Image (cartoon, grey):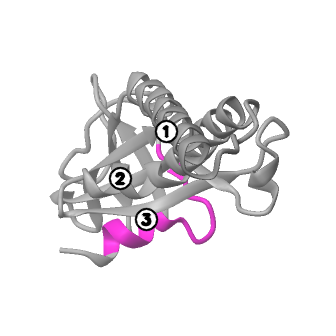
Amino acid sequence: MSNDLITMLAAGLFAAIVLYAARHATQKLLRRSLPTWLTPAAAGLAMILATVWGEYRWFADASARLPETAQVISANAASEPWRPWTYLWPVTTRFVALDGANRARPAPGVVATNLYLVARWQPVQPVTVAYDCVGGRQAVLGGEAAVTADGSLTSGAWSAAPEGDAGLKAACAGG
């Protein structure tokens, strides 16, 4: 979040410096001056554009920082009234990635793997999940919850995975 603030302020300062120099150059060369309101208007526009650019760039940057074995299985693109441009092009503010390198098969037909829950301005939340590939079920592991050799859970319960669940498909298709 502080990087976004610094980027926005730097863009505004850079635009103000460029327009300040342009005002003085036109005054010296053409003996005419650009309007004084142009400098703060350009600085404000540069700050808005830098902020919008950062919002749309976040998803690509965040997904590129994941391990090579991780794949994005779900992304949430949203539109919000305080960002009216998102009604034309929704912005992704959070996503879920599955780590294919940490797959384990604790029981026949069961795959345990890590999911990364990634949200803008939030720390990454790793969650260990077990998928029953045959029964189409899933369970969050951790704490005392684990999968036994017969496919049952030591704590907690299996829940039915939603129809067409991308996590179930990705976990059961790989490795």
| Residue at which label 1 appears | 21
Which sits in the foreground, 161 or 15?
Answer: 15
Task: State which quadrant residue 63 falls in.
Answer: bottom left
The amino acid type found where label 3 is placed reads Leu
Question: Which of the two marks, 1 or 3, is nearer to us in this view?
Answer: 1
CA distance separating discs 1 and 3? 58 Å
Residue 164 percent across, percent down from the top left:
58, 72
Report the residue marked by disc 3.
168
Counting from the top left corner in percent of width and height, residue 115 is at 34, 48
Q: Which mark is residue 61?
A: 2
Three-letter code, disc 1: Ala
Q: Which residue is drawn at the image coordinates 25% and 50% (left, top)? A: 65
Percent from the top left, x then y, of residue 144? 27, 24
Q: Residue furthest bottom?
A: 173
Q: Is residue 113 visible?
A: yes
**Of 5 and 116, which appears nearest the observer?**
5
SS under mark 1: helix
Residue drawn at (29%, 53%) of the image: 151
Q: Which residues make up the magenta segment?
A: 158-172
Q: Nearer the viewer, residue 172 or 13?
A: 13
Q: Residue at x 76, y 31 (%)?
A: 37
